[in-house]
């Protein structure tokens, strides 16, 4: 056993593994420590203090397994640390997948992974974040095993099925890694035989993973006696017709361009714009140089395949459109976009120039110097982008903290008024419409220009339904209320008694009607 751990430790402590891992861990903790050590809930978290993550009706049959590692309690520190560790391991495998040579580039990969704002959007729903990050790691492993081992597509298919079974959006991670790998081979002018030997394995892995996922989903649904939900069109998953296909393709390309240019993530201010422009220039210049240097243009099929694989990038990025035509994209589903700056870093060190000895010609030395400049630009621009991402993350956490404090103060006033309302009895039904009349309160969300696309972090009040108010007051204020739900709340909402009331904190914003406490928080019509 000691010998086994000794060999394992010898492998793990290698610099090429340790650098991306430690970069992700250190930068991840520095970026997200505030969230890990403070309770910054959102609306959904109010019903997820303990949640078994049995999301089979959403097609996520494996989520309960991966989330079970941290227990099903909403444990900030444990879930946060596990999430960062999963991403740190993913950084190592991504570095190995692309065969990254320099330690600086490997460190940049780790930093980009743990600062990308899609992770912050996921952390806004922290109770499920570790399961999602393990799903991301599995998506990376699916591509890695398939590329590195002759029969790795078998293990890759299993990893892919489990990844999709935890969160379907990460299928795009595997697809993009495969596409980037094939594009790299075209730029290196690999033979058609070499290209095909990898491409068919990727294809078999993808088909096999999809079939395993589907079979496991059907079995889990049958065992539990459930059906797929209609949310996000999950119940229509995989149903593609010739009539809807053109619209899906258009949506995929349109969304790709729109998010890249106006998504408020990559281009958030002048500093991030400079970083993105530099990385784009590095990618274009290096790709062109590799294409010409390897003489790939002399093989017509290389150019054709290069164009085809490049054209497929938007489709791979938004492959979720082909799983469900009714999908509504939010930032949690865009973690695959972090692969674009990562690939820019990978390409920045791919300038195919080797340093010569002391008798190198002046021309060779200039080529080496140019290669060094390109690599430095790539690493420095990615570091700048990581820093900008980290700032965005913490600006989001700033507002989440403000929102929590404001919600607590608001609920405290509600409880105080409830207990002073004539006829109120502890435990009586409470009809509460959760929308807040914002005109009566100061707007404290000053982060919108930065965080508008970071799901789960925006707004002034974090809860908006009676059940959420009940959970918030129960867990954070030691107050029990019995909220009215279902058809009864609709009847009360449309009743003349409710309509005549003014919005809280007006004097007549609460009253007891037929044994039910009416609370009106929304604006009066």
Image: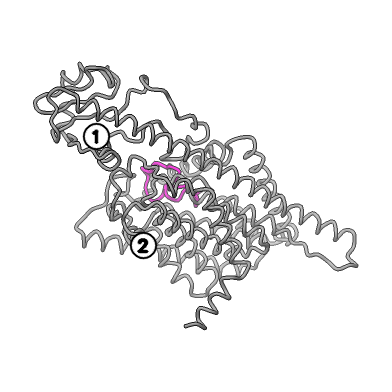
Determine whether, in the image, residue 474 is placed left or right of residue 141. Answer: left
Q: Secondary structure at mark 1?
A: helix
Q: Residue, x 30% and y 31% (percent of image)?
A: 411
Calculate the distance from the C-alpha at mark 1 to the C-alpha at mark 2. Answer: 32 Å
- In front: 32, or 276? 32
- Tell me how many marks there are: 2
How many neighbours does mark 2 have within 10 angstroms: few (below 14), some (14-19), or many (20 or more)? Answer: few
Residue 187: give x, y in percent of width and height. Answer: 67, 59
Q: Are marks 1 and 2 in contact (CB under 8 Å)?
A: no
Determine whether, in the image, residue 235 is placed left or right of residue 199. Answer: left
Residue 58: give x, y in percent of width and height. Answer: 31, 51
**Disc on res. 69:** 2
Residue 36: give x, y in percent of width and height. Answer: 44, 49
Mark 1 — residue?
466
How many neighbours does mark 1 have within 10 angstroms: few (below 14), some (14-19), or many (20 or more)? Answer: many
- The residues colored magenta run 315-334
- Tell me if residue 323 is in the magenta stretch: yes
Determine whether, in the image, residue 393 is placed left or right of residue 350. Answer: left
């Amino acid at each position: 056993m000691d010998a086994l751990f000794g060999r394992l430790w010898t492998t793990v402590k290698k610099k090429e593994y340790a650098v991306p891992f430690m970069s992700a861990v250190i930068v991840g903790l520095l970026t997200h420590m505030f969230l890990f050590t403070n309770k910054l809930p959102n609306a959904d978290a109010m019903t997820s203090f303990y949640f078994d993550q049995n999301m089979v009706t959403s097609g996520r049959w494996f989520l309960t397994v991966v989330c079970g590692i941290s227990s099903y309690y909403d444990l900030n520190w444990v879930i946060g640390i596990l999430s960062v560790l999963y991403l740190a391991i993913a950084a190592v495998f991504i570095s190995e997948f692309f065969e990254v040579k320099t330690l600086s580039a490997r460190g940049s990969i780790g930093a980009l992974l743990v600062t990308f704002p899609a992770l912050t959007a996921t952390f806004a729903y922290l109770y499920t974040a570790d399961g999602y990050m393990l799903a991301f790691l599995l998506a990376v492993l699916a591509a890695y095993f398939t590329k590195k081992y002759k029969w790795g597509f078998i293990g890759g298919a299993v990893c892919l099925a489990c990844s999709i079974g935890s969160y379907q959006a990460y299928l795009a991670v595997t697809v993009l890694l495969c596409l980037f790998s094939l594009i790299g081979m075209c730029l290196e002018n690999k033979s058609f035989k070499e290209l095909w030997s990898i491409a068919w394995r990727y294809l078999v892995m993808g088909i096999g993973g999809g079939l395993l996922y589907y079979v496991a989903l059907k079995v889990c649904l049958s065992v539990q006696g459930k059906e797929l939900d209609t949310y996000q069109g999950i119940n229509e998953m995989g149903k593609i017709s010739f009539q809807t296909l053109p619209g899906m393709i258009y949506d995929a390309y349109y969304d790709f361009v729109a998010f890249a240019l106006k998504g408020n993530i990559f281009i958030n201010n002048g500093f991030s714009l400079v970083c993105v422009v530099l990385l784009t220039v590095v990618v274009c210049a290096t790709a062109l140089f590799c294409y010409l240097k390897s003489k790939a243009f002399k093989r017509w099929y290389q150019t054709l395949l290069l164009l085809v694989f490049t054209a497929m990038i938007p489709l791979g990025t938004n492959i979720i459109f082909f799983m469900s035509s009714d999908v509504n994209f939010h930032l949690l589903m865009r973690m695959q976009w972090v692969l674009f700056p990562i690939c820019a870093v990978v390409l920045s060190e791919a300038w195919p120039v080797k340093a010569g000895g002391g008798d190198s010609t002046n021309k060779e030395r200039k080529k080496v110097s140019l290669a060094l400049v390109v690599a430095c630009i790539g690493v420095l621009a990615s570091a700048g982008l990581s820093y900008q991402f980290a700032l965005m993350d913490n600006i989001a956490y700033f507002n989440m903290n403000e929102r929590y404090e404001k919600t607590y103060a608001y609920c405290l006033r509600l409880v105080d008024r409830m207990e002073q309302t004539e006829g109120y009895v502890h435990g009586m039904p409470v009809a509460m419409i959760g929308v807040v009349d914002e005109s009566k309160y100061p707007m404290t969300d000053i982060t919108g220009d930065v965080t508008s696309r970071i799901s789960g972090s925006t707004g002034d009040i974090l809860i908006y339904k009676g059940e959420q108010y009940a959970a918030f007051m129960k867990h954070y204020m030691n107050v029990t209320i019995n909220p009215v739900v279902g058809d009864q709340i609709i009847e009360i909402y449309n009743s003349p008694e409710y309509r005549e009331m003014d919005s809280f904190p007006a004097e007549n914003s609460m009253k007891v009607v037929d044994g039910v406490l009416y609370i009106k928080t929304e604006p009066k019509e």
